[in-house]
C-alpha cells in the first residue's frame, strides 16, 4: 500500500516485546512508502515521544507493558494528547475489553492474533479517519447504563487528574502524590476535589471504587512527565 500523495506517515509502536515490535514494524514498512516508525517499550517512552513530537499520525499501543495495565494508560494518553489517534494492539480478545477501549477513545482495536491482511485493513481505515474493530464485535452490547455513565465521567478527567486518581488507587497519601508529581499538597487537594465532583462521588474511597469498577483493580502509578 502506498501512502497518499505527499503523505509520509509517522507511527509509534508501543510494546515491551522487541520481537513483536520488529514484526509489526516490518508489516507497516511494507505497507507505506517513506514511513517513519518510533519504537517504545513503556508508557514513559510513549509519553516522552508524544511530548516532543506532535506530528505522530498513530500510536499502536499494547495494553500490558511497563507503566500501564488495564485501561489507565489509554485514558491518560487520550487526555494528554487528544489529537493523536491511539489504536490498541493486544493479546486480549474479549469483546468487553474491546468495547471498553473504544469507549475510552481508542481509534481501533487489533488483536495480536489477526493476520497481515486484517492489520492492513485496520490501519487503512484508521488513517482514513474511521475506526476499526474485529468483525463481529457488537460495540453497543454489554455495559449497563450506570457503567456507561461512569465511563463517560472518567473520560472528562484531565491528564493530571487521571494521574492523581491512579495514585489514589495505589493508596498514596496527598503528600506522597504531591512529591511524585512535584506539586504542592494544596494542588493535589484541588485535583482530588475536582475528581470527586466529576465522578459524582463523595470520598476518595468512593472514587477508587468507581475506578476499580472499570479497571478491575488494575490502575497503575502514572508516568512522570
Image (spheres, grey):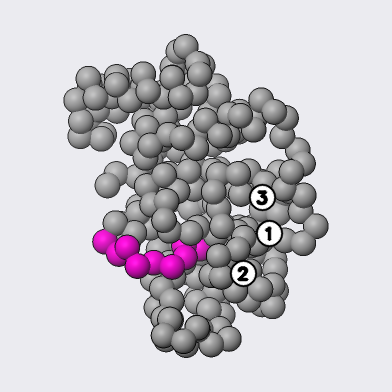
The residue at which mark 3 appears reads as 98
Label 3, label 1: how many angstroms apart (C-alpha)?
Answer: 8 Å
Q: Secondary structure at mark 3?
A: helix
Distance of label 3 from label 2 (alpha carbons): 17 Å
Query: For the residue carrying disc 1, how many other residues have a C-alpha within 10 Å: few (<14), some (14-19), or many (20+)?
Result: many
Examine the structure image and report whether residue 54 is included in the region drawn in magenta. yes
Q: Disc 2 on helix, strand or loop?
A: helix
**Residue reaching furthest to the top:** 202
Magenta segment boundaries in residue numbering = 52-60
Question: Does the magenta-highlighted stretch encompass residue 222?
Answer: no
Position of 100 compared to 16: left or right?
Answer: right
Distance, label 2 to label 1, CA atoms, is 10 Å
Rendered view: 113 above or below 163: below
Q: Nearer the viewer, residue 176 or 87?
A: 87
Q: To which residue does mark 1 refer?
A: 133
Whether residue 217 is visible: no
User: Whole-percent x and y of residue 47?
Assistant: 35, 54
**On the image, numbered disc 2 is attached to which residue?**
125
**Residue depicted at 77% across the width and 41% down the height:** 141
> What residue do we see at 43% from left, 68% from top?
57
Circle 2 packing at 10 Å, graded few (<14), some (14-19), many (20+), is some
Q: Nearer the viewer, mark 3 or mark 2?
A: 2
Amino acid at each position: 500500500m502506498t501512502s497518499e500523495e505527499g503523505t509520509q506517515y509517522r507511527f509509534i509502536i508501543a510494546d515491551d516485546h522487541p520481537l513483536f515490535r520488529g514484526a509489526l514494524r516490518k508489516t507497516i514498512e511494507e505497507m507505506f512508502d517513506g514511513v517513519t516508525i518510533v519504537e517504545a517499550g513503556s508508557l514513559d517512552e510513549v509519553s516522552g515521544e508524544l511530548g516532543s513530537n506532535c506530528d505522530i499520525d498513530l500510536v499502536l499501543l499494547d495494553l500490558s507493558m511497563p507503566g500501564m495495565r488495564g485501561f489507565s494508560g489509554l485514558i491518560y494518553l487520550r487526555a494528554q494528547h487528544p489529537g493523536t489517534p491511539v489504536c490498541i494492539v493486544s493479546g486480549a480478545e474479549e469483546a468487553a475489553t474491546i468495547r471498553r477501549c473504544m469507549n475510552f477513545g481508542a481509534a481501533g482495536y487489533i488483536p495480536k492474533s489477526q493476520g497481515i491482511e486484517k492489520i492492513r485493513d485496520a490501519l487503512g481505515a484508521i488513517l482514513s479517519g474511521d475506526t476499526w474493530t474485529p468483525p463481529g464485535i457488537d460495540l453497543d452490547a454489554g455495559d449497563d447504563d450506570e457503567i456507561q455513565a461512569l465511563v463517560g465521567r472518567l473520560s472528562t478527567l484531565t491528564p493530571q487528574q487521571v494521574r492523581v486518581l491512579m495514585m489514589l488507587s495505589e493508596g498514596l497519601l496527598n503528600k506522597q502524590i504531591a512529591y511524585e508529581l512535584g506539586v504542592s499538597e494544596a494542588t493535589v487537594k484541588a485535583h482530588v476535589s475536582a475528581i470527586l465532583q466529576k465522578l459524582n462521588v463523595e470520598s476518595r474511597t468512593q472514587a477508587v471504587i468507581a475506578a476499580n469498577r472499570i479497571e478491575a483493580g488494575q490502575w497503575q502509578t502514572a508516568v512522570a512527565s
